[in-house]
Image (cartoon, helix red, strand yellow):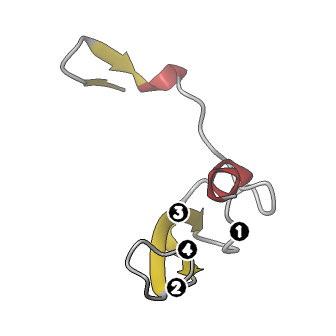
């Protein structure tokens, strides 16, 4: 399978498929990690809740380390 990306053809058969390390599932769902920002460090001076979209395993709910490492 290949797809056009505006700059040529992208061959997805050569792309790595991410597999859940906990249960070997290959299907992921959109999930959110919720961050709470204190008023002291918030740009608005008010406490804020920030949703950050990640992908979690559709079978066991595990979030791949690939996505968690970007949240630290």
Q: Secondary structure at mark 2?
A: loop
> Label 4's element?
loop
Q: CA distance from mark 1 to mark 4?
A: 30 Å
Seen in the picture, residue 6 relative to 37 is either above or below; the reply is: above
Where does the image place residue 42, in percent across and percent down from the top left? 48, 75
Instruction: State which quadrant residue 45 falls in.
Output: bottom left
Contact? badges 3 and 2 (CB < 8 Å): no
The residue positioned 35% from the left and 19% from the top of the image is 10
Q: In what element is the residue under mark 1?
A: loop
Q: Nearer the viewer, mark 1 or mark 2?
A: 2
User: Which mark's residue is nearer the viewer, 3 or 2?
Assistant: 2
User: Dot 3 corresponds to which residue?
Assistant: 54
39 left or right of 4 in image: right
Q: Is residue 59 left or right of residue 5?
A: right
Give the CA separation, mark 1 to mark 2.
31 Å
Farthest-out residue, left: 6
Residue 1: which disc? none
- Assess whether mark 4 and mark 3 are in contact (beta carbons under 8 angstroms): no
Asked whether disc 4 touches disc 2, contact meaning CB atoms under 8 Å apart, the reply is: yes
**Which residue does the numbered mark 4 point to in the structure image?**
41
Give above or below for 55 relative to 38: above
Residue under numbered circle 2: 39
Residue nearest the viewer, comparing 30 with 20: 30
Q: Which residue corresponds to mark 1?
A: 62
Q: Earlier in the sequence, mark 3 or mark 4?
A: 4
**Percent x, y of residue 40:** 56, 81
In this rendering, the label closer to the viewer, 1 or 4: 4
Element on which disc 3 rests: strand
> Label 3 neighbourhood size at 10 Å, few (<14), some (14-19), many (20+)?
some
């Amino acid at each position: 399978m290949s797809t056009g990306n505006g700059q040529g053809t992208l061959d997805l058969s050569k792309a790595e498929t991410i597999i859940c390390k906990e249960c070997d599932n290959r299907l992921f769902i959109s999930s959110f990690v919720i961050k709470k920002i204190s008023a002291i460090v918030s740009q608005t001076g008010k406490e804020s809740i920030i949703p950050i979209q990640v992908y979690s395993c559709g079978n066991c709910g595990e979030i791949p380390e690939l996505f968690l490492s970007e949240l630290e």
